[in-house]
Amino acid sequence: MSEETPESLIPYDEIVQEALRAVVGRVLSEVAATGALPGGHHFYITFRTQAPGVDIPGHLTERFPDEMTIVIQHRFWDLKVSNDGFSVGLSFGGVPSTLIIPFSAVTDFVDPAVEFSLKFQANEDEEDEFAPAQDDAPVAEPVEDGSNVVSVDFTKKK
C-alpha cells in the first residue's frame, strides 16, 4: 500500500487563498466606509507590481519591478474597495498617485499594531519568481524619501 496522500481534485489551496484575500477586502472596506483607521491600526500591503490588473505610476514600476509594499496609515485618500481589489491615493516623494491593486496581486497583509499578518501564495507558474516569505513577523524599515513605501524583511527568526 502507498502512504502518499492522493492529489485532491478539489482546489483547497485556491479556496483558502480566496477566503483570506476576502479578509483583506473586508478590512479595507470597513476603513473605506469610515474614512479612517480605528485606533492605532495601520497596514503594510505587499503586492506584485507586474500582476494582471495592477495599475501604478511608471516611476513606481521602475523602482519596484517585482514587488512593493505600501503603508495605509496617516496619509492616504480615496480608498475604494471592490470585489476584485482596491484603489488608494498615496504620495510618493511628494507626488500624489493613485494605485489600483487587485486582491490577487497581494502577497502580504500586515497590521503591526496587533501583530496580525496574512501571507498569500504566488500562482504556481510564478512561484520561482515570487517565492513566499518564510516568517510571519516582518521587520519594517521606512524608506527615507518621505514616501508611503517601506522595506519589509521577512527573514526567518533564529
Image (spheres, grey):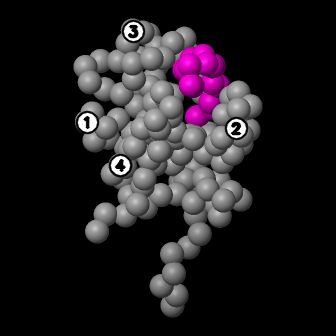
Residue type at numbered disc 3: Thr
Q: Position of residue 101 (x, y in %)?
A: 62, 30
Q: CA distance from mark 4 to mark 3?
A: 29 Å
Residue beneath label 1, please?
Answer: 114
Look at the numbered disc 2 and give the secondary structure of its residue. Answer: helix
Q: Position of residue 104 (x, y in %)?
A: 61, 39
Question: Residue at 27% of width from left, 33% of height from top?
Answer: 113
Q: CA distance from mark 4 to mark 1?
A: 14 Å
Q: Choose the circle earlier in sequence order: 2 or 3.
A: 3
Tell me where residue 65 sits by quadrant.
top right
Q: Which residues are magenta?
A: 88-103
Say whether marks 4 and 3 touch (CB < 8 Å): no
Residue beneath label 2, please?
Answer: 61
Foreground disc of the pair 4, 1: 4
Q: Choose the circle earlier in sequence order: 4 or 2.
A: 2
Queried whether the magenta region covers residue 102, the answer comes back as: yes
Which of the pair 89/31 is nearer the observer? 89
- In the image, residue 77 sits, relative to residue 144, either above or below, namely above
Q: Residues within 10 Å of mark 3 (few under 14, many from 20)?
A: few
Q: Residues within 10 Å of mark 2 (few under 14, many from 20)?
A: some
Look at the numbered disc 3 and give the secondary structure of its residue. Answer: helix
- In the image, residue 63 sits, relative to residue 137, either above or below, namely above
Say whether marks 4 and 2 touch (CB < 8 Å): no
